[in-house]
Amino acid sequence: MKKATVGAAVVGAATVCAVAALIVNHRMRKSSKWARAMAILREFEEKCGTPDAKLKQVADAMTVEMHAGLASEGGSKLKMLITYVDNLPTGDEAGVFYALDLGGTNFRVLRVQLGGKDGGIIHQEFAEASIPPNLMVGTSEELFDYIAAELAKFVAEEEEKFQQPPGKQRELGFTFSFPVMQTSINSGTIMRWTKGFSIDDAVGQDVVGELTKAMKRKGVDMRVSALVNDTVGTLAGGKYTHNDVAVAVILGTGTNAAYVERVQAIPKWHGPMPKSGEMVINMEWGNFRSSHLPLTQYDHALDTNSLNPGDQIFEKMTSGMYLGEILRRVLLRMAEEAGIFGDEVPPKLKSPFVLRTPDMSAMHHDTSSDLRVVGDKLKDILEISNTSLKTRRLVVELCNIVATRGARLAAAGVLGILKKMGRDTPRQGGPQKMVVAMDGGLYEHYAEYRTCLENTLKELLGDELATSIVFEHSNDGSGIGAALLAASNSMYLEDKS
């Protein structure tokens, strides 16, 4: 009897020991996996580092590239495009002006009534239409006839008080967000189509000429007085309300910047000296790159697999199209090497661009004690259930690293522009107020990103200048901004040079 009991006890003890060993093993495996996740996190954090000294190097590199791009066509990664906008709105503009905003598969037409000095924008209204898919790959005449017909409808609904006096043409600002080689304030050659458009017979044609012919065919009596891009429109909108605006930055799906340059500082400008002595430059700064940019293996992989490898490197580190994708790539590596979401790698996590920046923003801003928003997003988007609080905290920390790097680099870019303008050091007689006009969904909706960008620029400028810099959200540059540029370039202005 006793023997049997002892035997059973021995077997029982062995089982307990085996179970205990399994538990210890499991815990050790778990803790070593977590240690691996933390190692990936710390390495990523270190590689994304943007100490002030590095940001100043980035700003200096931006300034150098700006000089090179202004000196000659193709002299820099920055195109530094001459916009032919040499007089921005002053706030004195009066009358009714139109805008046409063609930025993709939708387009808008706007009517804006300006009240002159101290009057501001009295009235604005718009209509929106989408472009049928067959017209995106048809002929130039078909596309512009369709747009002109919508414009004709909008004009036909015009109230009597907005109608022009006899003999006076309506004037239009045209935002055309496709690659164009501008040849004057109201002409430009279509270089190529993007965003799913492919209209071969329009390439090499003047886009304003094509629209003007279509308006004639549709009986619309209207003159295009300004051809602009959305960043220049943002600058115009900012300048209309704040005379101290000299820089505009868009941070949305993509990113770009425009600023006011002295014509004497543009060696590649061979035209006449404008009366203002100034010219708005469209930087196309998304294409900036420098050895000082803190690129990681995730950035290199994203770039290699993109539609435009080697291009738009600055944009790929700072803009809304890409931040969520960088986060996804880091999470995928952690899932593969550290099993942060369990033994299986969640299949959805392998899909490029499945994690959008608005979702990253929502997780980053989660203030609930159990990080419920993070849990919900992981479940809804990536189909990952039952994540631990520890894992959710890790996700938030990654969001912070990606957003902080992007925002601080964008701030360094702005510092580079201010340096080029000689506005980065205090002037005699105290600091002069500087307003940066900002627009884009990333800036508008991602509060952590916005705050970090603004604080970083102030930090880099130093205490004395920090108080003089103001960020102004200049909404709808591609619409209202274009109408304002139609006003400031109206052929009816008496003092036009």
Image (tube, rainbow, N blue to C red):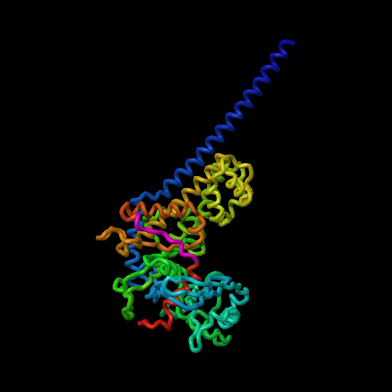
Residue 7 higher or lower than 310, as above or below: above
Which image quarter is the C terminus in? bottom left
Q: Is residue 53 magenta?
A: no
How many marks are shown on the rendered structure?
Answer: 0
Where residue 99 appears, as percent x and y from the top left, is 51, 75
Where residue 79 appears, as percent x and y from the top left, is 39, 69
The answer to whether 56 appears left or right of 198 in the picture is left
Where residue 90 appears, as percent x and y from the top left, is 39, 72
Is any atom of residue 98 visible in this view?
A: yes
Looking at the picture, tell me which residue is in the foreground, 305 or 113.
113
Residue 436 higher or lower than 497, as above or below: above
Q: Residue furthest top?
A: 2
Residue 176 higher or lower than 304, as above or below: below
Residue bounds of the magenta highlight? 467-475
Which residue is drawn at the image coordinates 62% and 46% (left, top)?
Answer: 384
Q: Is residue 473 magenta?
A: yes
